Image: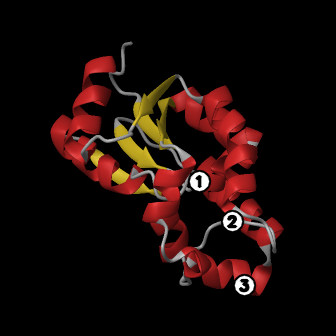
Amino acid sequence: MDIKDRNIVLIGMPGVGKSTVGVLLAKALGRYFLDSDVFIQAIQGRTLQEIIDADGLAAFRKIEEEYVLCLDLTNVVIATGGSVVYSEPAMRHLAAHGVLIHLDLPLDKIEQRLGNLPTRGVVMEKGQTLRSLYDQRQPLYRRYARRTVDCTNKTHEQIVAEIVRIL
């Protein structure tokens, strides 16, 4: 895989470690790092949960899509929000300019990590369970990912080393 001047885009469920791994990966490769959720919050002046609560899920997805489509970056590590896979235009844009890597964890491990689900800004329908969200998103992550990294029982440093190795 030749990644010169291409972004490395981390996709996956909330709680898999995209942001943490992204920062460490950017440091290891000497690249800039962008967290698309933080980018959205900074421009909007609101947390993801505030956007979802005030504007609704559909509006949040549209905002997320618009901000991802405006990204014009090269040689950057990007950690995406878990819901970006709902937007085919956003995913095509990310893939055109980068290598998409799916960070994967089993549902039980994600549940252990997501103690603050109601305030975390996770894009979920009212009454939707984490299991149904996981089942809905996993095929999308697999569809778009160039590679999948199983993060089970691995430290963030081990995950970074595996990504560097597969690139």
Q: Around disc 3, counting alpha carbons within 10 Å, would you say few (fewer than 14), some (14 to 19), or many (20 or more)?
A: few
Q: Earlier in the sequence, mark 3 or mark 1?
A: 3
Q: Earlier in the sequence, mark 2 or mark 1?
A: 1
Find residue 65 and report its horizontal and vertical position in percent: 69, 54
Rounded to the nearest whole Å, what is the CA distance between mark 2 and mark 1? Answer: 8 Å
In the image shown, does 160 or 134 lie closer to the viewer? 134
Q: Residue at x 56, y 50 (%)?
A: 107
Type of amino acid at the residue the image marks with label 1: Gly
Rounded to the nearest whole Å, what is the CA distance between mark 2 and mark 3? Answer: 10 Å
Find residue 3 and report its horizontal and vertical position in percent: 36, 21
Regarding mark 1 in the picture, which secondary structure is present there?
helix
Q: How many marks?
A: 3
Residues at circles 2 and 3 in contact by the CB criterion of under 8 Å: no
In the figure, 148 relative to 43: above or below?
Answer: above
Give left or right: position of 82 versus 55: left
In the figure, 141 relative to 46: above or below?
Answer: above
Q: Quadrant of residue 135?
A: top right
Q: Residue at x 42, y 33 (%)?
A: 150
Q: Residue at x 65, y 50 (%)?
A: 84
Regarding mark 2 in the picture, which secondary structure is present there?
loop
Find residue 70 and report its horizontal and vertical position in percent: 60, 51
Q: Residue furthest front?
A: 108
Can you tell which mark lies on residue 53? 3
- Residue 75, can we see it? yes
User: Please, which colouring scheme is shown?
Assistant: secondary structure
In the image shown, does 47 or 117 lie closer to the viewer? 117
Residues at circles 2 and 1 in contact by the CB criterion of under 8 Å: yes
Residue located beneath label 1 in the image: 82
Rounded to the nearest whole Å, what is the CA distance between mark 3 and mark 1? Answer: 17 Å
Can you tell which mark lies on residue 123? 2
